[in-house]
Image: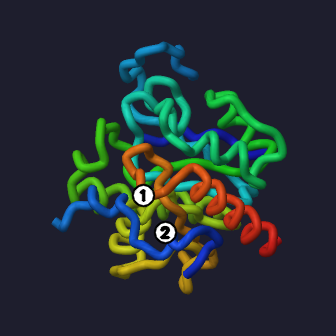
Amino acid sequence: MPVRWSLPESIPGPAALACAGSDLACFPAIAATPARRADPTPTLDTLPDYLGPGLRIAAVGLNPSPRSAALGYYFAHPRNRFWPALNASRLVRRPLEPSPDAMQTLLERERIGFTDVVKRVTASGSDLRAVDYRAGAPRLADKLLGAPPGLLWFQGKVPFTAFCRYVLGRRGPFAWGPQPFGFEAIPLYVTPNPSPANAAWSLADITRAMNAVADYAAARR
């Protein structure tokens, strides 16, 4: 059974799917369940990984926000489109209410795990530095090799670009969707960052992208 670890070109959609996506803007040029609160402040040093053996998909974000670290689940900002899109997609059998319990359900029932390229909590991705990526990406690679998922699903091109640079020695530009190369034997897939700051992509766009991930993962079983 999977366990929760606490270690600190093309997809269907509108013509907008051809663009690079606004989430590239914040990438440097190279340069125990916490209590739930209405207005949280961080209660954890970082957000736990939800990883383990036998996962069909591992979702990879950039780094935890203060709210996510406080509440103990990924994409905790109330305006983030991740949970609405996930619940409308074929990735889950039944809708889930965002919470640490939902993370555990995704891990055990849907076999979908979650982690980040960088585990340092910041209010914005633009607060990260090159040293964070140089340390975080190889650490992530080691975790994944310990229990390889069936698919590595990146939430935006920023975390994917960092992983490619500091683990695979590759530089972009990169396309959306399934990639023509993998990490060891793990296939790689990139979809738009669901952050509300990434306004170029609508909820419908992100839901279509998640359906494409679901179809791609199902086809590989």
Residue 61 horizontal side relative to residue 112, left or right: left
Relative to 40, does residue 181 appear above or below in the rendering?
below
Q: Residue at x 77, y 54 (%)?
A: 90
Front position in the image: 25 or 147: 25
Q: Residue at x 48, y 57 (%)?
A: 201
Q: Residue at x 37, y 30 (%)?
A: 66
Residue 200, numbered circle? 1
Residue 178 position in % (x across, y down): 59, 76
Please say if the residues under marks 2 and 1 sit with CB atoms less than 8 Å apart: yes
Relative to 181, does residue 110 appear above or below in the rendering?
above
Q: Amino acid at mark 2?
A: Ala
Relative to 184, does residue 200 appear above or below in the rendering?
above
Q: Which residue is mark 2?
A: 16
Relative to 125, does residue 32 appear above or below in the rendering?
above
Residue that protrudes farthest toward the front in the picture: 15
Q: Residues within 10 Å of mark 2 (few under 14, many from 20)?
A: few
Q: Residues within 10 Å of mark 1 (few under 14, many from 20)?
A: some
The quadrant of the rendering that contains the N terminus is: top right
The type of colouring in the image is rainbow
